[in-house]
Structures are given as C-alpha cells and as structure tokens.
Image (spheres, rainbow, N blue to C red):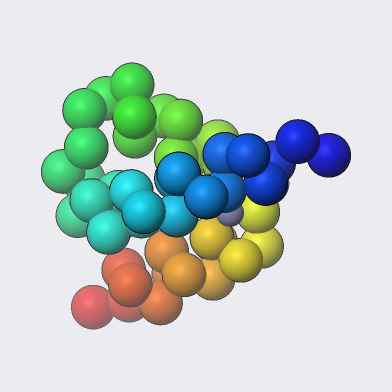
Amino acid sequence: MNENADHEGLRLALGGYVLGALPPAEMEQVRAHVAACDECRAAASAAGSS
Ligand SMILES: [Zn+2]
C-alpha cells in the first residue's frame, strides 16, 4: 500500500480538515485518505467530536 506517503503530510492537515478550513482540493484529498486510513479516521473523529 502507498497510503503512508500521504499519511505523513495529511495527518498534519487533519486539524484544518475537521474545521472545514482547508481549500476544497485539500479537503477532498484528506477525505479520501481518512476513508482509507484507520489512524487518521480515528484522529479526525476524535478531533471533530465536539
Ligand atoms: Zn493516515
């Protein structure tokens, strides 16, 4: 799998992603990664639980 290459960079964008603060293209990129990555899905879920 190649998801780890995205993981390093997109993990840093998760904070903006849960706030909806990223540019649309980046939101889509993070969303696609989160769908495939258990670790980032858990992190996004925890950060966006408010
Ligand atoms: Zn990830």
Q: Is residue 34 visible?
A: no
- Look at the picture and state if 8 lies above or below 2: below
Q: Position of residue 5 (x, y in %)?
A: 63, 39
- Look at the picture and state if 49 lies above or below 6: below
- The one of 40 and 50 positioned closer to us in this rendering: 40
Q: Quadrant of ligand 1?
A: bottom right
Residue extending furthest toward the left: 21
- Look at the picture and state if 35 lies above or below 50: above
Residue extending furthest toward the top: 25
Q: Is residue 10 visible?
A: yes
Taking the spot 61% from the left edge, 66% from the top edge, the residue there is 39
Taking the spot 46% from the left edge, 30% from the top edge, the residue there is 29
- The one of 18 and 10 positioned closer to us in this rendering: 10
Q: Position of residue 37 (x, y in %)?
A: 65, 54
Left or right of 14: which side holds 32?
A: right
Residue extending furthest toward the right: 1
Q: Position of residue 11 (x, y in %)?
A: 45, 54
Quick one: quadrant of the N terminus?
A: top right
Q: Position of residue 30 (x, y in %)?
A: 44, 40
Taking the spot 23% from the left edge, 78% from the top edge, the residue there is 50
- Look at the picture and state if 5 lies above or below 11: above
The tally of labels here is 0
Left or right of 23: which side holds 33?
A: right
